[in-house]
């Protein structure tokens, strides 16, 4: 979405030429391939360890960090692998998004029309809100050393990035709709 916004705001006359089916397909396939590769590597490594003790995962779902707590041997090398993959899988897209929005901010601030600036910023604000919510919570989980994490904190953050954030997406994006804004103003008693 950040690249789409970048092309729409910074290169509007080239939008249809740049955002064609081929480019969209490449972006989709790279996301799927990256997600599949990361999950396949971590799953393969996780299943290669011997497990002992209680077969009870102290988490809401079976993520690698939670499953690795059941392993009988030292998992520090896998924790480094999880951290490295997390940096690539999380931070690479985040930096692309950040670069897109820096370019957008530069283009918007150079606009002479205040209405145009407001429209461009309002177009991007909902996506920036969702990106900030998602990346801040998921980074809290995956980009910290495992030794500093409490299980209860980790569970709360996991609920936020896996349930709360996706549930808020439709609400956040719907505030851009004029009919929703009008209905909300009517409910709150404002004209």
Image (cartoon, helix red, strand yellow):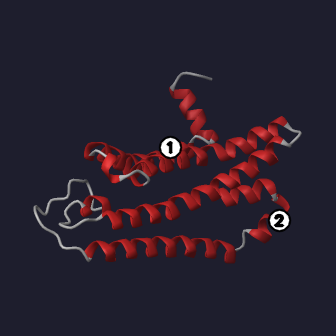
**Label of residue 171 in the image:** 1
Q: Residue furthest left?
A: 53
Name above or below for residue 18 compared with residue 22: above
In terms of secondary structure, where does tag 1 sit? Answer: helix
In what quadrant of the picture does the N terminus appear?
Answer: bottom right
- Residue at 64%, 59% (x, y): give it: 96
**Label of residue 14 in the image:** 2
Q: Where does residue 183 sit, x and y in percent of width and height?
A: 55, 34
Q: Is disc 2 in contact with disc 1, using a CB cutoff of under 8 Å?
A: no
In terms of secondary structure, where does tag 2 sit? Answer: helix
Work out whether residue 163 can be spotted: yes
CA distance for labels 2 and 1: 31 Å
For discs 2 and 1, the disc positioned in front in the rendered view: 2
- Residue at 27%, 58% (x, y): give it: 66
Looking at the image, tell me whether mark 2 or mark 1 is earlier in sequence order.
Answer: 2
Q: Where does residue 78 sit, x and y in percent of width and height?
A: 34, 67
Asked whether 174 or 148 is in front, the reply is 148
Name the quadrant containing residue 120: top right
Asked whether 43 or 156 is in front, the reply is 43
Q: Where does residue 87 sit, x and y in percent of width and height?
A: 50, 60
């Amino acid at each position: 979405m950040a690249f789409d916004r970048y092309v729409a705001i910074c290169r509007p006359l080239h939008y249809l030429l740049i955002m064609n089916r081929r480019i969209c397909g490449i972006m989709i396939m790279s996301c799927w391939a990256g997600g599949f590769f990361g999950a396949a590597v971590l799953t393969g490594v996780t299943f290669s360890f011997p497990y002992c003790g209680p077969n009870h995962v102290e988490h809401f779902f079976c993520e690698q960090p939670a499953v690795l707590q059941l392993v009988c041997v030292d998992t520090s090398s896998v924790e480094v692998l999880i951290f490295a993959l997390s940096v690539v899988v999380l931070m690479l897209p985040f930096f692309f998004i950040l670069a897109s929005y820096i370019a957008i901010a530069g283009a918007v601030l150079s606009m002479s029309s205040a209405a145009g600036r407001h429209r461009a910023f309002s177009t991007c604000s909902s996506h920036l809100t969702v990106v900030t919510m998602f990346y801040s919570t998921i980074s809290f989980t995956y980009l910290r050393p495992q030794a500093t994490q409490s299980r209860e904190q980790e569970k709360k953050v996991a609920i936020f990035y896996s349930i709360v954030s996706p549930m808020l997406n439709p609400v956040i994006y719907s505030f851009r709709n004029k009919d929703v804004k009008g209905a909300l103003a009517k409910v709150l008693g404002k004209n």
